[in-house]
Image (cartoon, rainbow, N blue to C red):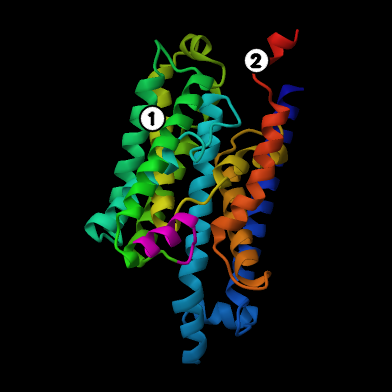
Amino acid sequence: MFRFERRARTRRALVVTAALAVVAACVFMCSMMLGSYLLGPAEVLRSVLGLSAEPSVDFIVRELRLPRAITAVLAGLALGAAGSIFQRVLRNPLAAPDIIGISAGASSATVAGLVLFGAGGFGLSVASLVGALVTAAAVYLLAWRGGIADYRFILIGVGVAALLESVTGYLVSRAEISDARAAMTWLVGSVGMAGEGEIIGLAIGCGVVIPVLMALSRRLGVLELGADGARGLGVRPQAETAVQLGCAVVLVALATAAAGPLAFVALMAGPIAGRLLGPAGDRVLPAALVGAVIVQTADVVAQHLLPYPISTGIVTGLTGAPYIAWLLIRNSSPTDSRSER
């Protein structure tokens, strides 16, 4: 009986993961085809593979559309995987990096690099990574009381995020007009701003960190049992928590450096993947693929389905705001429940 259930879960996980990969690939192709100059699937494939003999098509595909589409896929993969890790380690659906200050830390450091030092490319990725890691370490230390409690971690993270957003606003207000305009455009979140350096850094991060998180997924399941349960199974919960969250922070930082703070993608991807999978095992890769679908779809909507183009982050924010309101209503805190009783 147990073996049959295990096979059924494995089969469901494979089907869901494959279906999400197909959907992500289809949205990717649509994003490459759509625009003021419509292209067919064959034209896109020939150009991407270097088989096209039309310079105009190659320019549209390779120079204009391909970097944007790749950034959308990579940013979605990174944010989806990172959000799933935060939510499972902290055992709370609100524990997303854009809620608990990690994205705000990366944003503040990146804006400082843009405004104060004129950084770009690889320099922005480094600044974002440093800002995210320092913020994560600060929240972790401030929330530590002989261990990490999910609600304390989240509340402290919300406070740190508010502080860092004020710092970001101050930096923008003191910048030159051109730098302030660039920073504000970046802060809204858009997959069309990434340069070659940011895309390469994000690709390397996804290619290294996501497989590591997938390899650690069994330990993640042990962490969900709580500190005492994890110790009983031979896992050091605090060290494992630091490793898992550290990997997730790297993904968030690189995605933020490339595309800006895309709101609520990390918050939504994990729960959607969990609903699709049920009890069917590892969620890291499915959550990453859900994130890629969300970001790509948001970018298609932002660029092609509205009267005029807007930034990708506006669409993700408009989509995520009702979700988080529903989540807050649905998940009342334990203290509220006790007071009602």
Eyeballing the image, is 49 above or below 228? below
Outermost residue toward the left in this view: 117
> Quadrant of the image for the N terminus?
top right
Crowding at mark 1 (Cα within 10 Å: few <14, some 14-19, many 20+): some
Can see residue 219? no
Across and down, in percent, residue 55 comes to 46, 91
In the rendered structure, find residue 243 and report the number of the disc placed on it: 1
Q: Residue at x 63, y 33 (%)?
A: 281
Q: Quadrant of residue 164?
A: top left
**Lateral position of residue 26 relative to residue 130, left or right:** right
Name the one closer to the observer, 222 or 71: 71
Q: Quadrant of residue 121?
A: bottom left
Q: Are marks 1 and 2 in contact (CB under 8 Å)?
A: no
Q: Residue at x 73, y 29 (%)?
A: 330
Task: Count numbered badges in the picture.
Answer: 2
Q: Is residue 105 magenta?
A: no
Which structural element holds mark 2? helix
In the rendered structure, find residue 158 and report the number of the disc placed on it: none
Crowding at mark 2 (Cα within 10 Å: few <14, some 14-19, many 20+): few
3D distance between C-alphas at marks 1 and 2: 28 Å
In the rendered structure, find residue 334 and report the number of the disc placed on it: 2
Name the one closer to the observer, 287 or 340: 340
* Residues rendered magenta in the picture: 180-192
Can see residue 20? yes
Identify the amino acid type marked 2.
Pro
